[in-house]
Amino acid sequence: HDSQNDSTPVDLPLELVLGKMPQKTFIDNHLSADLIPLKLPDGTQVMDAVDRVLRLISVGSKRFLVHKVDRSVTGLVAQQQCVGPLQLPLANVGITAHTHFGITGTAVACGEQPIKGLIDSAAMARMTVVEAMTNLVWAKVSKIEDIKASGNWMYAAKLPGEGAKMYDACEALRQSCLELGIGIDGGKDSLSMAAKCGDEVVKAPGELTMTCYVTCPDITKTVTPDLKCHGSKSKLLFVDLGGGNTRLGGSSLAQVYNQIGNDSPDIADFKLVKNAFNVTQDLIGKRMIAAGHDRSDGGLIVTLMEMAFAGNCSIEVNIPDEKNVGDIAVLFNEEAGLVIEVTESDYADVLNAYSSAGVPCIDIGTASTGGDLIQISVGGASSCVNEKMTVLRDLWEATSFQLERRQRNPDCVAQEEAGLKNRISPQWKLTYKPEATNETVMKGQNKHKVAVIRQEGSNGDREMLSAFLAAGFETWDISVSDLLEGNVTLKEFRGIVFVGGFSYADVLDSGKGWAGVIKFNTGIFEQFQAFRERDDTFSLGICNGFQLMALLGWVPSTKGLPESEQPRLLHNESGKFESRFSSVKVLDSAAIMFKGMEGSSLGVWVAHGEGRVHFPDKSIHEHVITNKLSPLRYVNDSNEITQEYPFNPNGSPDGMAALCSEDGRHLAMMPHPERVFTTWQWPWTPPEWKDFTVGPWLKMFQNAREFCDSN
């Protein structure tokens, strides 16, 4: 049934689909569990617990996961895992755009609470649903009723008592969805979550994972956890969805003391959850919430600390203890809730909005810049936490860095770990004002043609086509097969672009297979050579395209170099694929695509495994430096050219991120400007850039069009 027009497009009796198969009957019984109340060691202080909880892998940084996969490919990623000026892995929700030329998209968020299921499987299911919702709430969604979900079950259902637990969880999940007005439209089950070896049975904890997804009318109205501290100071508010309870069963605190507990957090009032969701959505739509995060693993204390870590700032917080349960219960319970940052000008209106909806929301403190201190007190007592933010952040990062040492060059990991405590917000600056392409150009006829060339395994073609389209080109999507089969030639094009990706899966090293196809097929090799030698053409190679152009000898020499002297790209110094939002600086050069951008420093996505520029001949290296043939360099937060990891993600000498030909028409670079030509593609921008209507990198593509206009 379609509720929008009251039609019934499908009305099919289930019997025709399922036949008359008899229903199966499974019988299981509830088994009583011997649950022991949580008891911490005598004398346990808040900071003792903090030291343990922040190191727990489910609570601590996920840095060891996020940098080894491409988080920007397609150019449609509006919110990936990392947030804030330092790009810490703390995002609540993932968002992808529907198109490069609009602001609609889809939001996805997850919820999972497996340890709580060891106490009460029904409570686990309810908490899982609400965790997904309190993650999803930070994206501006169409409406709560549009939310759909995938429910994935992991249970050792054939073991005694486990089937009954799963049934209870399923009943609780069904009721939760009904009360919230959301629906499950798919999922998967893994019901053999146990292994037997001899007399021993190893059983995985039963778990439900909820993945919620919904349409977003405006992907620019997304709230991230990093504190913004507008006007140097802002207010922190706490929305309690747990009914004032402070249950510690199944918590991270219990886990780090090798216990489970006997009293799990739960949801008693779904109407409250729904009201809180809708009020928060309304405030996000009005841009009245600066930052937000949910209370979950680790409790309220971790929520607050993570927001400060991501914002690289100080907080001063006092949390009430109305039931006199003590600071540890107040700070480490994992009842559902939200923490919100608002400006002082919006403070009263936000409090009133929650109050009017019957949602408890209280002022718990402030966030501020210019300091490096986390101060937390409970019930007005003296601070139980009074420590440098960077010291606590190092604890939160500690386990991740230990894991990183097992998968990356340990020297690189040591550099990143040591440098983190001294990080500041990137000091980007622009020597030009980003402007959208003139409407006359966009609507004009006889536009310059650019060929965006891809090979088997390429994956950066869609966003590249869009970037050149936004600059006023007529863009053509061309595969190497099109050229080999004679379906098209390069004669009619003013520009060609070799896109990023993994041509031939990098089996022959990056770009070698692609280069071989061009070099050893005389017909297209001659086409490429003729195109290169025309003085009215330009070429651009990004990532895999840089590797290709180096192998073809298009950069840095206009006439080419002997193969033994030709620079090429080697494996990153870290030994791993690197996905980073790096800072780069544009230097003076002949590169036509960087005209008017010289002196600017700005962020850009990198995503490669073989990006380290290598010069077999030192004289060529010196020639490149002397003749300004490396127009783009990796820089640190202070805009200084650097070799330090991870600012320089691959170890290229002199921070080299690009090479150009001596005449400036041919440019090859490792970073991906085509993935940041709109403002919403940027994972973080300085506050002073908030009025930009287009991304600063669009100018690079506009420069290519202006070159064509002049030639």
Image: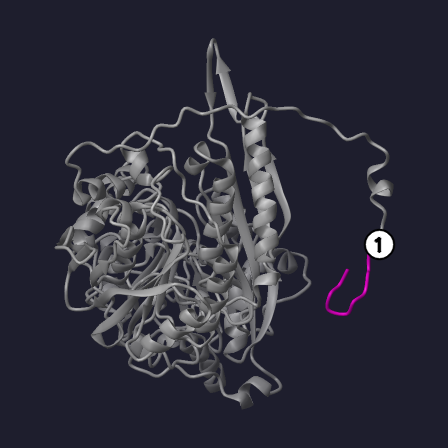
Tell me the quarter of the image containing the N terminus.
Answer: bottom right
Q: Which residue is mark 1?
A: 11
Residue, far front = 323
Please say whether residue 653 is one of the residues in the magenta stretch: no
Quadrant in the picture for residue 405: top left
Which is more toward the observer, 266 or 524? 266
Which is more toward the observer, 39 or 411? 39
Residue 327, percent from left and from top: 22, 48
Query: Would you call the spot at circle 1 few (<14 residues within 10 Å), some (14-19), or many (20 or more)?
Result: few
Overall secondary structure of the magenta section: loop
| Residue at 53% across, 47% down | 210
Whether residue 527 appears in this view of the structure is: no
Residue 648, percent from left and from top: 27, 56
Q: From the viewer's perspective, is 587 left or right of 446?
A: left
Specify the color scheme: one colour
Q: How many marks?
A: 1
Q: Is residue 196 above or below residue 422?
A: above
Residue, far top = 198
Q: Which range is magenta?
A: 1-10
Please say whether residue 7 is one of the residues in the magenta stretch: yes
Quadrant in the picture for residue 588: bottom left
Residue 260, percent from left and from top: 35, 32
| Residue at 29% across, 39% down | 253
| Residue at 26% across, 32% down | 39
Whether residue 337 appears in this view of the structure is: yes
Which is more toward the observer, 542 or 567? 542
Residue type indicated by callout 1: Asp
Secondary structure beneath disc 1?
A: loop
Residue 500, percent from left and from top: 47, 57
Q: From the viewer's perspective, is 237 left or right of 187?
A: left
| Residue at 41% across, 67% down | 673
